[in-house]
Image (cartoon, rainbow, N blue to C red):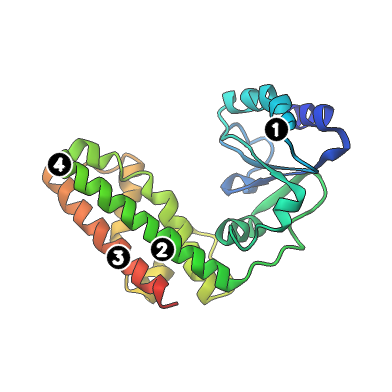
Amino acid sequence: MEKFINELQNILNERLTSVFMYGSKVKYTNEQLRSDVNIMVIIENLSGVDLRACSTAVKKWIKGGNPSPVFMDKTEWFHSADVYAMEYSDIKDTHRILYGEDLISGITVDKDNIRFQCEQETKNLLMRFRQFYLENADNPKRLKDSFIPLTKTCNAIFKAILRVKFTNVPDEKSDIIKKVGEITGLNTGTYEKLLCYKRKQCKMNNKEIIEFADEIVSSITILLNYANNM
């Protein structure tokens, strides 16, 4: 991580404004960090020339097993809290400044913007899954491959719902799921089954895959109806 940031410093000089971690790995110690680290890089007057200059360093960072870092212009960062309200809320709750200025503590995220994005993300999720189901209802193997990516989006939606209704979001995923179930009427067993399948602790036959796809459609519909009326 230090090597990556040093490379960015050498390329961008004083225009490298801030580098910070976000996501679950923030709670890890430096000794525990090995890979899968989410990083955002904020640059003064970010240009295409900068992206080209940083490309080699970024490729090495990705080769180490990390997601591609998010690059953003400094002005753009301050003007995007309304559009990316869910993401900014997550970052405000869980982040670690690695270099430069703290551009996070001064950001305010409006609950109305969180609610709007939450509805939009839930609606998009439902539309995408419905369409995929339409096209693959006769192919259980392909259908089950779509289950795992749902967990990340659902978790983001759960946290957004709790942020709109309350002030704080529980740290533990199990507590988040329980609280969402209590206020939305959602059968949390559906999400728990998704997690079980993602962790490769559960198996499904073809009949169970189809039945579970039906269950997912119903569950996302419940979430959408709740988000619509928040």
| Marks 2 and 3, how far apart at CA | 16 Å
Q: Position of residue 224 (x, y in %)?
A: 36, 67
Residue tagged 1: 48
Closer mark to the observer between disc 4 and disc 1: 1
| Label located before the other in sequence (2 or 4) | 2
Residue tagged 2: 177
Q: Which residue is drawn at 60% across and 31% down?
A: 34
| Residue 40 located left or right of residue 84 | right
Specify few, some or many for label 4: CA neighbours under 10 Å numbering under 14, 14-19, or 20 or more: few
Q: Residue at x 44, y 66 (%)?
A: 119
Residue tagged 3: 221
Specify few, some or many for label 2: CA neighbours under 10 Å numbering under 14, 14-19, or 20 or more: many
- State which quadrant residue 36 falls in: top right
| Marks 2 and 4, how far apart at CA | 26 Å
**Rendered-image quadrant of the C terminus:** bottom left
Q: Looking at the picture, which amino acid does disc 2 mark?
A: Ile
Q: Is residue 100 above or below residue 226?
A: above
| Marks 4 and 3, how far apart at CA | 24 Å
Residue tagged 4: 205
Q: Looking at the picture, which amino acid does disc 4 mark?
A: Asn
Q: Looking at the picture, which amino acid does disc 1 mark?
A: Gly
